[in-house]
């Protein structure tokens, strides 16, 4: 277990390192930072000053080392737009995004798991077929358009739920949260549901496929032969086996949930990282872009790591293999 | 080379003659009503996109044809000079229906071009990896793994952050974000093929590498490439619409469906739903139609079923 | 005293599905079993032995269904019994051991969980008591250091050990009837005989009746009191073990015996039954064995009735009556 943990950590570090190189090459080599950094109207002297300030006249490898050094110290430069450290800006917005993403994940599981279980246990019922068709729609509908329609129906036409911002927030552990107030919760509902739609379909289909794979197994029959109630057979024997693939994929998809929150945050004016990155791309606020990309890379690497560990805890077979 | 008279055609690549097989596949395809509906819808969509300049009630991007008096009219209204606006108009008096027709052109173009380009790059990479093996394979596949572990939208955002906004850059971003999918599948298929006897035979006959690649490995990977490609067109269209909606994609002079939807967003809040709604429906129908066709293609082209 | 189990004219059918035709896996099967006795149910693979066992357990897979007959267990008909009453019988009064021990234990639950839940399914005892009983049951089937082994997961056991666990689970509630579906087929020969011996002792001690399903006549001859021979869903011959083995009446039974390698026929060529086992979805008309039978008569084109003879019965209109060579 310990050796495999070390190996995984090492692999994760390599991926991180590779990504810093890719981001660096992308931003500093393919894109021309001089264009981005310098006002086109600036005179030659000013240009030279800026180039020297950012070290753009140095050889590439030196620039890269400087870039790496900055990253290690958490220094991604200062946002041109906000005139604040880029990393600080990102971290400030992160809780809002995480809150949205976790709520969406919760919805996806709370809706997808039971529906998938139902559709898997009773595949021939009309209701199951309706559920499955619905999930195809959930896959095909573009998230942003669904978001607009949610706004149209629930905010504009019915006037039930607000369509922008976080609403009232409460501070807990030094961070502001929406889900702790009634108003905040109302604000959270539409964006979270919007973000959850695609993943709900995914969880649903995974669960159904899992049920259909596990149900015919001999051990399920044996569990019934012991005289267990149908409840116990389904909720312990079937569900526990099913959770292994579901947790794995859902964990992997959590990252894409955060990536996709870019769209949802733009629609619902949710003040998270996603909205910030779109604004930054539009305003060419390079330090913020780089900080965001690096944060996402770190997030993904950490996520993969956590899933690996969850997987080990869930599946005793993996646990044993890792031990020796 | 010429002193080896054994033509590679003698090596079994296809068991059935292509025309017979094609007809059989066609029949299989027609067995699914959903797929047939999807195909018909898709044909109509493509036709509309191609013929947009001929069949649109107006050219929505010719400012001369727009009448500000006609702005924000609800569906079914009459224009100032008596023409009907079937799906209403936008804030500049542009006919929504015409906007959709023209928007489809951009959306389909972006989807098809990026899918084909990604298919070519990905297939080439996958084939090379499988054929060459060794370091090239390891390197390429590591890259593929790395890329596939990040969601497409993030890859696309990353690219746009580097390249800047614009429709061409969106296409490039889509290609870079999607090639890895093809590469992985093609390599897997080609690896299976590579172990088969006829490839051994071809190697023993010392047929040149390109010949083995193109005559034997490639045809066998084509089915999966077509299937992925179809689905990828739908994904690319959806992604392009998303990026355009975020203001990173198509320009105002050549708006895609996503751009149209984006334009209507601010009016949506005041209840003028049609400006965003109808382009969205068009986008939805396009994506669903392609997916229906792609699903069926996957079922019948799956080697296990034939 | 009436029998513990009496199966009368049991029919179990699998409805047709788009990708496969319907079939009658158990066809008009009747037999009975006394308390404490062992019935050997033999027949080649695919003849319907397992489905017979699952029919008794009420666990036939969809789209299969018991469509006719009765299964009288201690006087109660299990066919059409309400699901909860059936559940309360399962594992408590009728238990089952499956063929492949690698597949019967849930890979993600510990042995302890799987044993304790089996106890709690029928008895409201404390966690502690359940734990101790599970441990003792493991000890009884010959698993060393049962206390530690309880915490293990199935993949940490060998096939033979897993089958012992399954047997321990089956014996937890001292059932009246155990259906053992080829429990040793997947195991090494040495482990086979150990498990058979242990099983025999345990069943004797608790006076449990056993249906031992197998395709191996050698095992049956050691273990069973009664024998039922199944062919293509029908019981072609039933009776006491020694009678059936010494004087088989049905030509199929005779063929089956002749194809067993055994000491007294050393040096003699094994005689395989000619032909192949029939397709269950498309059985020959009349007696299903007719196409492979060297004693077939024109009358075999209609299904032969069950012919009773002192303590035994067979389905054949031209039975083997002459003395064996
Ligand atoms: N789940 C099922 N669906 C359809 N047919 C089945 C199913 N289970 C068993 N059968 C059919 O029932 C017949 C008897 O099977 P079985 O009782 O398992 O044979 P065996 O004597 O080897 O135990 C076989 O022809 C088999 O194909
Ligand atoms: Mg069997």
Image (tube, coloured by chain):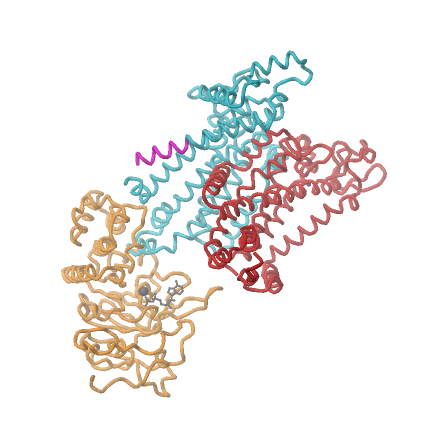
Chain colours: A cyan, B red, C orange
Residue at point 63%, 29% (across, down): B164
Which residue is found at the position 70% from the left and 36% from the top?
Answer: B255
* Viewer can see residue A153: no
Look at the magenta stretch and give its main secondary structure: helix
Q: Please give left or right for residue A305 compared with residue A31 in the image.
A: left
- Viewed as shown, does residue C314 lie left or right of B84? left
Point 44% across, 37% down: residue: A251
Q: Quadrant of residue C233?
A: bottom left
Looking at the image, is C223 positioned above or below residue C97? below
Work out whether C79 lies above or below A323: below
Image x and y of residue A38, in percent:
63, 18
Residue A169 lies within the magenta run: no
Instruction: Locate residue A262, reporting x and y percent.
Output: 56, 31
| Quarter of the image that includes the N terminus of chain B | bottom right
Which of the pair C217/A30 is nearer the observer?
A: A30
Q: Is residue A9 a member of the stretch shown in magenta?
A: yes
Query: Picture coordinates of residue A179 (x, y %)?
Result: 48, 28
Left or right, A5 with reference to A22? left
* Residue nearest the viewer, comparing B36 with B158: B158
What segment carries the magenta color? A1-12
């Amino acid at each position: 277990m310990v050796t495999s943990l070390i190996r995984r950590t090492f692999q994760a570090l390599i991926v991180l390192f590779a990504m810093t190189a890719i981001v660096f090459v992308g931003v500093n080599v393919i894109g021309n930072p001089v264009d981005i950094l310098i006002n086109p109207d600036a005179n030659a002297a000013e240009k030279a000053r800026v180039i020297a300030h950012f070290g753009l006249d140095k050889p590439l490898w030196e620039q890269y080392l400087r870039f790496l050094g900055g990253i290690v110290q958490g220094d991604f430069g200062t946002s041109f737009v906000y005139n604040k450290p880029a990393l600080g800006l990102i971290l400030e917005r992160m809780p809002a995004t995480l809150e949205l993403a976790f709520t969406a994940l919760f919805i996806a599981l709370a809706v997808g798991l039971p529906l998938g279980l139902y559709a898997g246990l009773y595949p021939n019922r009309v209701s199951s077929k309706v559920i499955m068709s619905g999930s195809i729609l959930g896959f095909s509908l573009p998230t942003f358009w669904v978001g607009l329609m949610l706004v149209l129906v629930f905010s504009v036409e019915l006037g039930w739920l607000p369509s922008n911002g976080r609403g009232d927030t409460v501070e807990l552990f030094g961070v502001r949260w929406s889900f702790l107030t009634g108003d905040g919760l109302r604000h959270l509902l539409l964006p979270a549901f919007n973000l959850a739609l695609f993943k709900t379909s995914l969880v649903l289909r995974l669960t159904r496929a899992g049920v259909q794979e596990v149900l015919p197994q001999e051990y399920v029959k044996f569990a019934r032969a012991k005289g267990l109630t149908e409840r116990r057979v389904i909720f312990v024997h079937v569900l526990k086996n099913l959770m292994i693939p579901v947790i794995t994929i859902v964990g992997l998809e959590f990252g894409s949930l955060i990536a996709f929150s870019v769209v949802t945050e733009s629609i619902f004016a949710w003040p998270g990282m996603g909205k910030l990155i779109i604004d930054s791309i539009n305003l060419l606020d390079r330090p913020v872009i780089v900080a965001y990309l690096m944060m996402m890379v770190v997030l993904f690497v950490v996520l993969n790591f956590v899933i690996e560990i969850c997987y080990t805890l869930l599946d005793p077979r993996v646990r044993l293999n890792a031990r020796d | 080379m010429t002193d080896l008279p054994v033509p590679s055609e003698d090596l079994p690549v296809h068991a059935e003659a292509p025309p017979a097989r094609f007809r059989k596949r066609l029949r299989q395809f027609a067995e699914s009503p959903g797929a047939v509906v999807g195909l018909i819808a898709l044909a109509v969509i493509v036709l509309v996109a191609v013929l947009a300049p001929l069949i649109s009630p107006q050219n929505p991007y010719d400012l001369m044809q727009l009448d500000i008096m006609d702005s924000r009219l609800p569906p079914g209204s009459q224009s100032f000079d008596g023409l009907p606006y079937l799906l209403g108009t936008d804030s500049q008096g542009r006919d929504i229906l015409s906007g959709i027709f023209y928007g489809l052109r951009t959306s389909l173009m972006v989807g098809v071009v990026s899918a084909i380009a990604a298919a070519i790059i990905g297939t080439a990479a996958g084939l090379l990896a499988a054929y060459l093996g060794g370091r090239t394979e390891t390197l390429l596949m590591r890259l593929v793994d790395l890329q596939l572990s990040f969601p497409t939208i993030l890859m696309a955002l990353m690219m746009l952050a580097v390249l800047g906004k614009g429709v061409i850059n969106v296409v490039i971003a889509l290609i870079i974000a999607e090639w890895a999918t093809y590469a992985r599948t093609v390599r897997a298929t080609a690896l299976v093929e590579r172990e088969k006897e006829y490839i051994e035979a071809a190697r023993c006959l010392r047929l040149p590498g390109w010949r083995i690649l193109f005559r034997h490995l490639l045809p066998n990977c084509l089915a999966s490439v077509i299937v992925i490609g179809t689905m990828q067109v739908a994904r690319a269209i959806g992604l392009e619409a998303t990026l355009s909606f975020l203001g990173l994609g198509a320009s105002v002079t050549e708006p895609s469906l996503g751009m149209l939807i984006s334009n209507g967003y601010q009016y949506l809040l005041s209840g003028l739903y049609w400006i965003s709604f109808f382009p969205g429906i068009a986008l939805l129908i396009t994506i669903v139609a392609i997916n229906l066709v792609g699903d069926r293609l996957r079922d019948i082209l799956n080697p296990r079923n034939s | 005293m009436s029998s513990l189990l009496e199966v009368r004219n049991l029919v179990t059918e699998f409805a047709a599905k788009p990708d496969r035709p319907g079939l009658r896996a158990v066809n008009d099967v009747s037999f009975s079993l006394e308390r404490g006795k062992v019935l050997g149910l033999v027949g080649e693979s695919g003849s319907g032995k397992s489905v017979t066992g699952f029919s008794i357990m009420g666990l036939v897979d969809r789209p299969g269904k018991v469509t006719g007959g009765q299964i009288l267990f201690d006087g109660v008909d299990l066919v059409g019994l309400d699901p909860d009453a059936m559940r309360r019988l399962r594992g408590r009064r009728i238990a089952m051991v499956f063929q492949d021990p690698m597949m019967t234990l849930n890979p993600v639950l510990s042995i302890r969980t799987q044993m304790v839940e089996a106890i709690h399914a029928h008895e409201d005892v404390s966690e502690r008591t359940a734990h101790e009983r599970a441990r003792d049951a493991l000890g009884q089937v010959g698993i060393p250091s049962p206390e530690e082994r309880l915490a293990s997961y199935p993949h940490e056991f060998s096939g033979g050990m897993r089958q012992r666990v399954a047997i321990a689970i089956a014996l937890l509630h001292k059932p009246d009837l155990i259906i053992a579906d080829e429990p040793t087929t997947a195991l090494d020969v040495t482990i086979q005989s150990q498990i058979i011996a242990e099983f025999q002792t345990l069943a004797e001690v608790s006076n449990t009746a056993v249906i031992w399903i197998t395709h191996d006549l050698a095992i049956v001859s050691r273990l069973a009191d009664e024998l039922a021979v199944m062919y293509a869903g029908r019981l072609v011959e039933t009776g006491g073990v020694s009678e059936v083995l010494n004087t088989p009446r049905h030509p199929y039974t005779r063929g089956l015996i002749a194809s067993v390698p055994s000491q007294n026929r050393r040096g003699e060529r094994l005689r395989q039954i000619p032909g192949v086992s029939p397709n269950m979805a498309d059985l020959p008309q009349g007696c299903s064995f007719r196409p492979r039978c060297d004693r077939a008569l024109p009358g075999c084109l209609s299904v032969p009735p069950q012919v009773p003879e002192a303590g035994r019965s067979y389905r054949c209109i031209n039975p083997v009556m002459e003395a064996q060579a």
